[in-house]
Image (tube, rainbow, N blue to C red):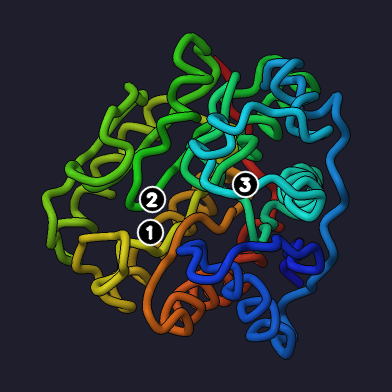
Amino acid sequence: MLTLFYCDHYDIPLPPGHKFPVRKYRLLREALTADCAIDLAPAPLAFEHDLRRIHDADFVAAFLDGSIDPIKMRRIGFPWSRGLVDRTLASVGGTLAATRTALQTGLAGVLAGGTHHAFRHEGSGFCVFNDMAVSAAWLLEQQPSLRIAFIDLDVHQGDGTAAIFAEEPRVFSLSLHGAQNFPFRKQKSSLDIEFPDGTTDQAYVAALKTGLAAVSVFGPGFAYFQSGVDGLAGDRLGRLGLTLAGLAERDRLVLSWMSARGIPGVITLGGGYSDPIERTVEAHAQTFRLAATFLPDFSKPRRTFSR
């Protein structure tokens, strides 16, 4: 079974009308509960030393104890609370646990995470700490010669991830995102592919094939797939025109690319802000259900990469 870690058992108290779709996490877990090919597990909490592998120690300590500058919290987009601390630690802990699981099974995921707007010294855009970067740093400690790819298909550029690993030759960051969307000050990924507003399935899939070809040349031995579905047509924050069928083709391309090359990896959630939110939940569930069908291919002996 495909193991997925969840963290919606920790609640984020938000004021009425807040635009972050906190309900989707519980709804997604409930939608996947009956799937016999999926094993759902509560995410463990990350430790402070895990966070300091990537993030500035003063920033980490200030967020954890609540002394963080209110200006930094406004940039993140949440009011500080103990619930937010626990939820954030679970999000990072879930991706770490999924990474360890994927090393054994070939593929795992987290029904949270993908917090790619978090930088070393501060958070941004609903992202406190960068779960994928923290997990990748742990993985590089375990396997110093490993090469890691980030395949970031959220509609918003993975600016924090790009900045964190800008000088790391063992990491390749691929980001496909809206040219005119947040963040408005972009960072430089290993490869950025930008789309005009309204881009539809055919153009998106063609661009993704080009991006994956570039990642193939890099030759990763592990991948993080940020599977945000905010590119879905009608998403409140997305501005692209992808369909559910187009997102399925996107996911199928990434998963078949990974499995064919023997690249184990982790799927994180990322963004999705449709109204009604059930449409976003359907798109996220589609990703993980499709991933479960690929798991037998990942469980086969895997090719190793060296360079």
* Residue 300 picture location, percent across and down: 69, 55
- Per the image, the residue denoted by label 2 is 153
Which residue in the protein does label 1 denote? 253
Relative to 60, residue 272 above or below = below
Q: How many residues crowd mark 1 within 10 Å: few (<14), some (14–19), many (20+)?
A: some
Q: Is 1 left or right of 264, judged from the image as shown? A: right
Quarter of image, res 120: top right
- Between disc 2 and disc 3, whose residue precedes? 2
Q: Disc 2 residue type?
A: Leu
Q: Nearer the viewer, residue 245 or 134?
A: 134
Can you identify the residue that label 3 sits on? 265
Instruction: Name the residue type under label 3.
Output: Gly
Residue 109 is drawn in which quadrant? bottom right
- Residue drawn 47% across the image and 43% down it: 125
Q: Position of residue 28 (x, y in %)?
A: 61, 77
Q: CA distance from mark 2 to mark 1?
A: 12 Å
| Secondary structure beneath label 3 | strand
